Image: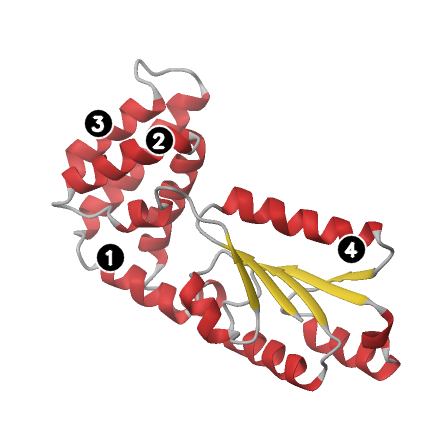
Amino acid sequence: MIKIFTGDDQAVSRSKFSSCIRIYKESNYFTINITSENLPSLIQVDQDKGLFNQGTIYYGENLLSKKETREIINKISDENRNLTLILWDEGDNRFIKKSIPKAEIIESRQQVNIFKFLDSITPGNLKGTCTLFKSLNVTVDINIIFFMLFKRIRELLLIDNREYQNDSLAPWQTAKLLSQKQKWNIDKLLSFYDGLYKIEVRNKTSDSYYSLSQALEILFSLYL
């Protein structure tokens, strides 16, 4: 059995994932935390020892961005019906379903999708971005929105780096980010990133006349 917790409401999906692992531990299952690096060796050793029949629970986070890891997971699930693998992943739900077709997907969705908001951050789309931002700000902590926005702009700046693509992103993520970056002038994107950095510094030092939400809206009006 493979169970994958995902969805754009990452706080809820991660909480469900953690609760699931905790229940297994409290029920005296033998739990093993896995990574993309130790997965092949752990699986082989435990398969040789016959631990699949003794209630071993494997769990891990964000393992599905690498093709070779997805192939290993599909292979061992086909060969070992007693395998129990519990995952949390921040990837796109459709990509996960296509990549791990036999998995049970537990999706947690926000009323307003934060990734739809992040995808809207392009010059010429001020109205659309602000509409999504205001709706999102009602249900999601502004600090989480800011963190995700900062992360997205940093990703856009790094996406042309092949090493970054291979190490950090699934193919669909790379394609989406490259498409979004093409809509930006690089100097304007760098200035936008610099604006986010200044907002972060002023917010941490309480040296700002504006709230974090107001500062972001001003930044949007200058660059979108």
In the picture of the structure, the residue carrying the numbered disc 1 is 180
Q: Quadrant of the C terminus?
A: top left
Q: Identity of the amino acid at label 4?
A: Tyr
How far is the residue under mark 2 from the one under mark 1? 23 Å
How far is the residue under mark 4 from the one under mark 2? 35 Å
- Quarter-wise, where is residue 106 in the image? bottom right
Kindly report which numbered mark, 4 or 2, lies closer to the viewer in this rendering.
4
Q: Position of residue 39 (x, y in %)?
A: 69, 72
Looking at the rendered structure, the secondary structure element under dot 3 is: helix
Q: Identity of the amino acid at label 2?
A: Asn
Viewer-proximal residue among 41 and 80? 80
How far is the residue under mark 4 from the one under mark 3? 48 Å
Evaluate if marks 1 and 4 touch, with contact meaning CB atoms under 8 Å apart.
Answer: no
Which of marks 2 and 4 precedes in the sequence?
4
Q: Residue at x 62, y 84 (%)?
A: 75
Looking at the rendered structure, the secondary structure element under dot 2 is: helix
Image side of residue 27 versus residue 204, left or right: right
Which of marks 1 and 2 precedes in the sequence?
2
In the picture of the structure, the residue carrying the numbered disc 2 is 137
Binning the other alpha carbons within 10 Å of mark 2 as few (below 14), some (14 to 19) or many (20 upward) gives some
How far is the residue under mark 1 from the one under mark 4? 41 Å
Kindly report which numbered mark, 4 or 3, lies closer to the viewer in this rendering.
4
Q: Residue at x 55, y 49 (%)?
A: 13
Q: Quadrant of the N terminus?
A: bottom right
In the picture of the structure, the residue carrying the numbered disc 3 is 218
Q: Identity of the amino acid at label 3?
A: Ile
Kindly report which numbered mark, 1 or 4, lies closer to the viewer in this rendering.
4
Which of marks 3 and 4 precedes in the sequence?
4
Evaluate if marks 2 and 1 touch, with contact meaning CB atoms under 8 Å apart.
Answer: no
In the picture of the structure, the residue carrying the numbered disc 4 is 24
